[in-house]
Image (cartoon, rainbow, N blue to C red):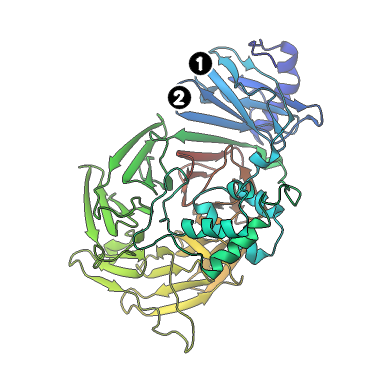
């Protein structure tokens, strides 16, 4: 394929690309759309015109990558207001296909005319490298329980690393045991040993996992199963614009991305002591170093929340601290958990200050859960054994949410319960999800005091109406989504994303329609947020392993 810049031919504009633009613009769009900044056709010898190919453009020197999707006629186009004049590198995502050259496609975008570039794809020579975690899980043989044992692996790395390894069962068990000594907030390029853990002989569960992995990797010399892939986007799933914002540090691990009232997006770093802020209008990210409270312990933070005064609250993970940041003064205040300097397992993950104006209390999700009185500094631990049926196993929460009266709601990722704790009596009440072993992970309350949450193992978006004590669940269409968090836009759409299949999902709560939008890159999604100021609503996520924030903009309801 030549890198020569092609002029836009009149026959192209009046024919295929114009038709493609009308389809791309969606229902109700003007019949004479403004000429795009860049447009073209995507084809391959095997398929001809190709729908559902993600085409990404990044200007030289820019931190932003813009992605559109080819429509039913194989046409793609970038709106004029999305690409400034300059030299752009083009990339594609279409499982099973790639551009014919390893050198990036480059095109010059000009201010007054449309740049044209047709893309002819060829079959990839390395399909395994293109698979998402979810596609690997579809391909792996084994029971559902065996595959779920790999869910924790994707917290640090892709399943491609496992599938392409060559360790036998004994060696793999040793690798699993060694990785169990790493703290949360680790990656292969940034391992963080957890205090109090040591490398040693594999335990039975680690040996069993090593044995299973040896049956799905390359230890026998060849891959013992065919590779399965998800279909490309079609229809509404192709009517979307996705923007990726590179963060200043390549090692950044944006775990939670949350938009404030001014439209700025704040993010936590799961592996380092930074709080970040992105201005989507300029693409500029500003980072603030978080003070180290526990020298020698693993670094990184997780939850990002705002109180009614606009203060930013965070859980500082293995630093064992609750952190508050004032955006006006740019100052941090920290509170250590009880005895956190003495305990290796001291961990502050989740923070819930959103309703603290009700009673001055903040809820904390940690190795245990607490109600913290900010005025007195008193930490009161939740006793899950109160009101628990005799003989029942111990309970605990991962995600933390609070209703309008500041009652605590814990999401039990290792089981299938939503646990309500009364803010005054601290008495828990247990509600079991309709789907067994669903793994509720994280969620948000809406303006009707309903809790929306992700069922990590159930592959559902869940909603719990606490007043009616009623659940509702919606199945996600693409297998192994591993949804991590869910949020409702207070109008029509609920959103979720996860660590599995590089998709985000939008649920129309009025019709039950779920649309899966494929992302341009391998994306490890944790907490999600939604921009409710636009219609239809837009999703914000962090790529925890990709040092980027991502905005997903549907082009039609």
Q: Earlier in the sequence, mark 2 or mark 1?
A: 2
x, y percentage for residue 541?
A: 48, 45
- Residue ID at (54%, 55%): 153
x, y percentage for residue 311?
A: 27, 50
Q: Is residue 318 left or right of residue 32?
A: left
x, y percentage for residue 526?
A: 48, 51
Foreground pick, 188 / 419: 188
Kindly tell me whether residue 485 is visible in this rendering: yes
Residue at the limit of the structure toward the bottom, as seen here: 390
Which residue has dot 1 on it?
86
Foreground pick, 133 / 418: 133
Query: Do the numbered discs 2 and 1 sit on residues whose CB atoms are within 8 Å?
Result: yes
Badge 1 element: strand
Q: Any mark on residue 6, and which?
A: none
Which residue has dot 2 on it?
62
Query: Crowdedness of circle 2 by 10 Å Cα count: few (<14), some, many (20+)?
Result: few
- Residue ID at (56%, 47%): 158
- Residue ID at (37%, 80%): 427
x, y percentage for residue 276?
A: 34, 41
Kindly tell me whether residue 459 is visible in this rendering: no
The quarter of the picture where the N terminus appears is top right
Foreground pick, 555 / 275: 275
Badge 2 element: loop
The quarter of the picture where the C terminus appears is top right
């Amino acid at each position: 394929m030549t890198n020569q810049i092609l002029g836009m031919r009149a026959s192209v504009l009046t024919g295929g690309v114009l038709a493609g633009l009308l389809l791309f613009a969606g229902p109700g769009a003007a019949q004479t759309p403004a000429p795009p900044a860049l447009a073209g056709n995507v084809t391959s010898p095997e398929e001809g015109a190709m729908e559902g190919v993600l085409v990404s453009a990044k200007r030289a020197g820019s931190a932003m990558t813009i992605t559109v999707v080819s429509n039913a006629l194989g046409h793609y186009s970038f709106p004029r207001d999305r690409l400034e004049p300059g030299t752009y590198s083009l990339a594609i995502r279409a499982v099973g296909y790639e551009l014919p050259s390893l050198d990036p496609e480059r095109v010059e975008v000009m201010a007054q005319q449309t740049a044209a570039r047709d893309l002819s794809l060829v079959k990839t020579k390395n399909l395994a490298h293109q698979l998402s975690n979810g596609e690997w899980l579809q391909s792996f043989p084994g029971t559902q329980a065996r595959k779920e044992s790999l869910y924790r692996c994707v917290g640090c790395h892709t399943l491609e690393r496992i599938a392409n390894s060559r360790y036998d069962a004994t060696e793999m068990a040793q690798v699993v045991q060694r990785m169990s000594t790493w703290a949360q907030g680790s990656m292969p390029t940034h391992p963080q040993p957890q205090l109090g853990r040591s490398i040693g002989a594999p335990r039975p569960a680690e040996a069993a996992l090593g044995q299973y992995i040896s049956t799905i990797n390359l230890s026998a010399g060849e891959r013992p199963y065919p590779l399965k892939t998800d279909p490309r986007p079609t229809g509404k799933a192709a009517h979307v614009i996705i923007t990726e914002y590179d963060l200043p540090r390549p090692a950044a691990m944006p775990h939670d991305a949350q938009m404030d009232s001014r439209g700025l997006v704040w993010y936590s770093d799961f592996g380092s002591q930074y709080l970040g802020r992105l201005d989507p209008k300029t693409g500029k990210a500003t980072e603030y170093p978080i003070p180290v409270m526990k020298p020698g312990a693993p670094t990184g933070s997780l939850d990002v929340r705002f109180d009614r005064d606009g203060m930013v609250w965070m859980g500082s993970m293995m630093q064992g601290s609750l952190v508050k940041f004032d955006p006006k003064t740019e100052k941090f205040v920290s509170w250590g958990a009880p005895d956190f300097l003495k305990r290796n397992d001291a961990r502050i993950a989740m923070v819930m200050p959103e309703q603290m104006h009700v009673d001055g209390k903040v809820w904390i999700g940690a190795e245990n859960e607490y109600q913290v009185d900010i005025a007195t500094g008193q930490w009161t631990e939740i006793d899950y054994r109160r009101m628990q049926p005799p003989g029942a196993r111990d309970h605990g929460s991962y995600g933390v949410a609070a209703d309008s009266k500041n009652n605590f709601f814990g999401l039990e990722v290792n089981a299938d319960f939503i646990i309500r704790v009364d803010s005054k009596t601290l008495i828990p009440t247990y509600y079991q999800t309709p789907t067994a072993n669903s793994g509720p992970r994280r969620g948000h309350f809406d303006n009707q005091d309903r809790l929306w949450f992700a069922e990590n193992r159930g592959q559902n978006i869940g909603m719990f109406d606490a007043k009616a004590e009623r659940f509702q669940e919606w199945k996600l269409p693409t297998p192994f989504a591993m949804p991590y968090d869910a949020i409702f836009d207070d109008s029509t759409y609920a959103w979720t994303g996860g660590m599995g299949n590089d998709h985000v999902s939008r649920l129309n709560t009025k019709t039950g329609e779920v649309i899966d939008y494929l992302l341009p890159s391998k994306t490890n999604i944790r907490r999600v947020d939604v921009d409710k100021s636009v219609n239809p609503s837009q999703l914000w996520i962090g790529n925890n392993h990709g040092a980027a924030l991502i905005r997903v903009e549907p082009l039609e309801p």
